[in-house]
Image (cartoon, rainbow, N blue to C red):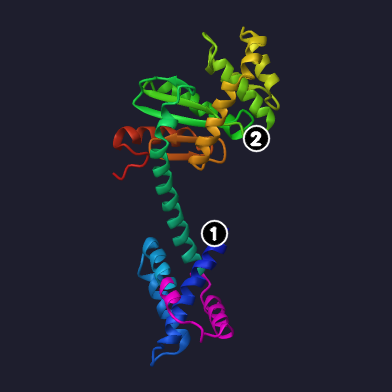
Amino acid sequence: MSAPNMALVAISAALFGALAMFMLNPAPSTGSDEAIRTLVGTMLDERDAENAASSQQALVAQAAETSTQDINPETLYPMIENFLMDDPKILQRVSVALQEQLRLDEVSEAKIALVSFESEIYDDPDHVVLGNPDGDVTLVEFFDYNCVFCRAAMPDVARLLAEDPNLRVIFKEYPILSEDSVNAARVAIAVSKTPGADYWAFHELLYTARGQISGETALATAQSMGMNRIELELAARGANVTDIIQKSYILADGLKISGTPAFIIGDEIIPGAVGYERLRDSVANMRKCGSTVCNT
């Protein structure tokens, strides 16, 4: 549901609760419109986003406990419509409060998920680790070789690796865009398991290749680096490679990651190609205060 629609639902629920209470317990000295405006306006003006959301829930609960069988929808709905038409900015205010509350809920849920899946994120023996394996901060990236945003983010990750000697970087293959992506990921995993192979060089070459990245593209790239094409192709078909990719799918689902790139730094899941500065600052904040966002 879109934010405007969610906002409309929220304000309608609030108005319904206010109207239900008013119609069953009307104020003797004021007209209906004025009383409604007082009830809802006070709720929005005197409370912050979190309290506004709680107030809306309280109104709905109170309305649910009230007998509303005598409230005529033909009276109720026009009153709601008139109220919104008289002050349409109220929807914007509710939408802002609602979006902020949803954002806080998402952050809270993400933190819980990160704790629940901590071992799968950081201790999987099959993921690729670059940079300092004993680094004090870890950056995790879920990626797809055919993701244009992953391609855009690759230089940012490369710069972080080059500039930060205490950064640990974990790469998790998350091929979700096409069958070509899956086949390329299979070869990449086989490369990562090949003794002496330069995984990072292979990774960079794939992201600088032109056109759709496929299993054939990955095999040709590995062969150009001196690796045995036939051995890699056989290894890429192995059940263990399938299991590694499946683990990424399960983990991403548990973390509610649905797109690429997606980064994890400490207590935050960062979706999208957010740029070098955003990633660098998040890493710096982890060192400073143990969170990607420091309050001071």
At which x and y percent is residue 236? 62, 18
The answer to whether marks 1 and 2 mark residues whose Cβ atoms lie closer than 8 Å is no
- Kindly identify which residue carries mark 1: 3
- Seen at 29% across and 37% down, the residue is 289
Q: Earlier in the sequence, mark 1 or mark 2?
A: 1
Which range of residues does the magenta coloring cover?
Answer: 61-90
- Kindly identify which residue carries mark 2: 177
- Seen at 64% across and 23% down, the residue is 184
- Seen at 31% across and 36% down, the residue is 290
* Dominant secondary-structure state across the stretch colored magenta: helix
Residue found at the very far front of the displayed protein: 239
Which residue is more in the foreground, 195 or 291? 195
Is residue 255 shown above or below 195?
below
At which x and y percent is residue 17? 45, 76
- The image quadrant that residue 293 belongs to is top left
For label 2, the crowd category at 10 Å Cα-Cα, with few meaning under 14, some 14 to 19 and many 20 or more, is: some
Which residue is more in the foreground, 119 or 296? 119
